Image (tube, helix red, strand yellow):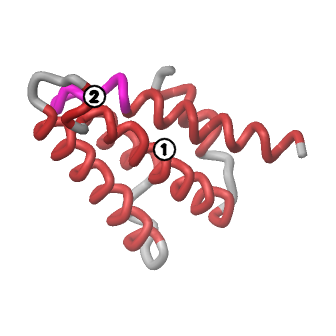
Amino acid sequence: MTIQEVLDVVVPLSREQRVVWLIDLGWAMTVSARGGYPLAGQAEPVPHMMAFNELQHQLFNYLIHSREKDDWTIEDFIQGLCEKATASGVKGDLGWALKSSLEKIAKRRVQ
């Protein structure tokens, strides 16, 4: 899934829909972070967990900040999240979280 594909779905959302999506993304990120649990078999699970901790910190900062100000765009947020995930070596796991959260949007539209 590309950043543009994510943006194509997320940018048109209303403020309320975007908050719901961010909550879904946060939930999916907790699932992706579990890939860093020691039983998941990673050679070094701590960096994986630390990376997701930082990504979730960004997500919550965006949620808090965007309630009052419009200077941090959703485009910049998603781009930054993806860049941090790539630099931290968790791009694939963040990709799963993004895809999972977008699938929930699609399911809500069908209902």
Look at the numbered disc 2 and give the secondary structure of its residue: helix
Choose the circle earlier in sequence order: 2 or 1: 1
Vertical placement of residue 60 versus 42, above or below:
below
Of discs 2 and 1, which sits in the foreground? Answer: 2
Q: Position of residue 85 (x, y in %)?
A: 26, 34
Q: Quadrant of residue 71?
A: bottom left
Query: Which of these two is toward me, 4 or 111?
Result: 111
Q: Is residue 80 found left or right of 24 in the rendered image?
A: left
Numbered circles on residues, count: 2
The percent coordinates of residue 111 (x first, y second) are 90, 46
Q: Residue at x 22, y 51 (%)?
A: 54
Find residue 40 and name its label.
2
Residue at 49% x, 51% y is 27
Label disc, if present, on residue 28 of the rendered structure: 1
Location of residue 63 (image quadrant): bottom left
Numbered tag placed on residue 12 in the rendering: none
Q: Amino acid at mark 1?
A: Ala
Q: Residue furthest right?
A: 111
The residue shown at (56%, 51%) is 24
Start-end of magenta stretch: 86-93
Q: Amino acid at mark 2?
A: Ala
